Image: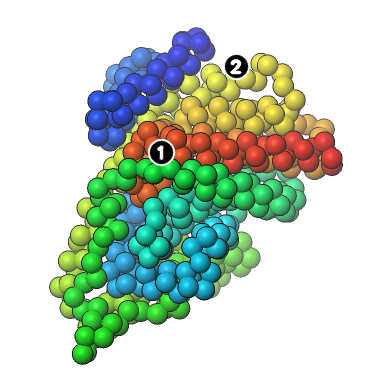
Amino acid sequence: MSTALLLTIAVASVLILLLLVIKAKVHPFVALLVVSLLVAIATGIPADNIMKVISAGMGGLLGSITIIIVLGAMLGAIIECSGGAESLAQRLNQALGVKRTVAALTMAAFILGIPVFFEVGFIIVIPLIYGFTKVARVSPLKYGLPMAGVMLTVHVALPTHPGAAAAAGLLGSDMGWLMLLGIVISVPVGVVGYFVAKAMNRRQYQLSVSVLEQLQLAKPEGSQGRGGSELTPGAWLISSLIVVPIVLIVLGTFAHSVLPEGNMLRQVLTLVGTPAIALLIALALSAWLLGLRRGWSRDKLSDLLDRAIPSSAGVILVAGAGGAFGKVLVESGVGKALALSLETINLPLIPAAFLLSLALRASQGSATVAILTTSGLLAEAVTGLSDMQLVLVTLSACFGGLGLSHVNDAGFWVVTRYLGLSVADGLKTWTVLTTAMGLTGFALVWLLSAVL
């Protein structure tokens, strides 16, 4: 199939998806499956392989995020209903004010994003976002957009994550310089994202009913102490419980990198440092410290955790369907066709790396796949470049993977669902935000290439 036809099918599939979701009001899960099927048929994927590809795309993504989303939802439900998130929010708001609190949480999200995968980190901070939203009486977008933006920036740009680390290996970039320059560039990119998100929050967005309901959750019975006095958990306890999974993940990563193979401590830390186990430990601690120890019955706690599962099911299904759509686009050859067509233009390497990665990101959804594919395509072209130029080409590809997060990206659905955005508003906010931040990162990389 010709490149032009493949690209036409890709554009048409996105337009059909948007029409189904925005105009026809079809549920995103169903719409994504329908469009995946249409693309598979149109691009000539054999009939007996179509459902295998769709299932592989959905299953591959759900295998990595389902446990995390469910455990994160349960942890968030306990923190929310204990009143702990509001307690922490009130403490910080009193100390800093709302405007400074948004900036402080964005900086915290930057640090959190260095060791923790984007989706995992965002799910961990969701209780905080909801708690601050209720206390400050503002939209969750005020906190959620800049925090999510800066976490995704760190996820694509630093070699603590698979995309940048693998790209460095493919292109032969120095890992130390990549980490250093990645941080140096990510900081101003995060600042730009903060102000872009601030500008977006000047207008009002209609939030989903499910998110509005979560923002109005009442404290459960048992949060009152003897004599009717509040037993709201303190800010330090809530902070510690949120930090627990982060610390465990960091320790697991550190142990895997530093300790020798076969070392017992390495094996233990690697196990407890996996995101699912780290969240499970944090959930157990929260259930005891925020619930059972404060007078909740086991039935009350079980009922609360049961109610947390349906709220996460929508996010899981839509994200999985997004993974299926992305897999079909990859198998159809759309991404490769885009990459090859851009490669023939013979641009300088730094803008070529950015545009290749951005096009691949837009065509198949995954930032990591976009970065890796771009690095593989440019592996021979970078021969003879200096160490610093290699690092800059790598970063250019990484920031290309940051932009144009839209309907074929599972992360788009995670962010928009948790923040209560419609698809149309998600495109106006999250897609624009990630693209603005990606362009800023590329501009800074290109500027550095002229100076260094």
**Residue 128 in the image: above or below residue 180:** below
Give 162 or 11, whichever is nearer the viewer. 11
Find residue 216 and report its image quarter: bottom left
| Residue at screen point 54% across, 29% down | 360
Which residue is depicted at the point 55% across and 63% down?
Answer: 100
Secondary structure under tag 2 reads: helix
Residue 139 spot, x, y in % from top left? 39, 52
- Rendered image: mark on residue 244: none
Q: Which residue is mark 2?
A: 341
Of residues 155 and 431, which is closer to you in this image?
A: 431
Relative to residue 220, is residue 401 drawn left or right? Answer: right
Q: Residues within 10 Å of mark 2 (few under 14, many from 20)?
A: few
Q: Which residue is mark 1?
A: 426
On screen, 371 above or below 288? above
Q: Position of residue 377 (x, y in %)?
A: 64, 28
Q: Quadrant of the C terminus?
A: top right
Residue closest to the eye, 109 or 246: 109
Extreme residue in the left direction: 299
How far is mark 1 from mark 2, CA to CA?
A: 29 Å
Kind of residue sitting beneath label 1: Gly
Q: In this rendering, does residue 365 appear at all? A: yes
Mark 1 residue element: helix
Is 269 situated above or below 6?
Answer: below
Camera-side mark, 1 or 2: 1
The location of residue 277, given as percent across then percent down, is 39, 64
Label 1 vs 2, first from the N-terminus:
2
Using residue 210 as the reference point, say whether residue 371 is left or right of it: right
Name the residue at 25% across, 63% down: 217
Residue 256 lies, in percent from the top left, at 57, 62
What colour scheme has been applied to the protein in the rendered image?
A: rainbow
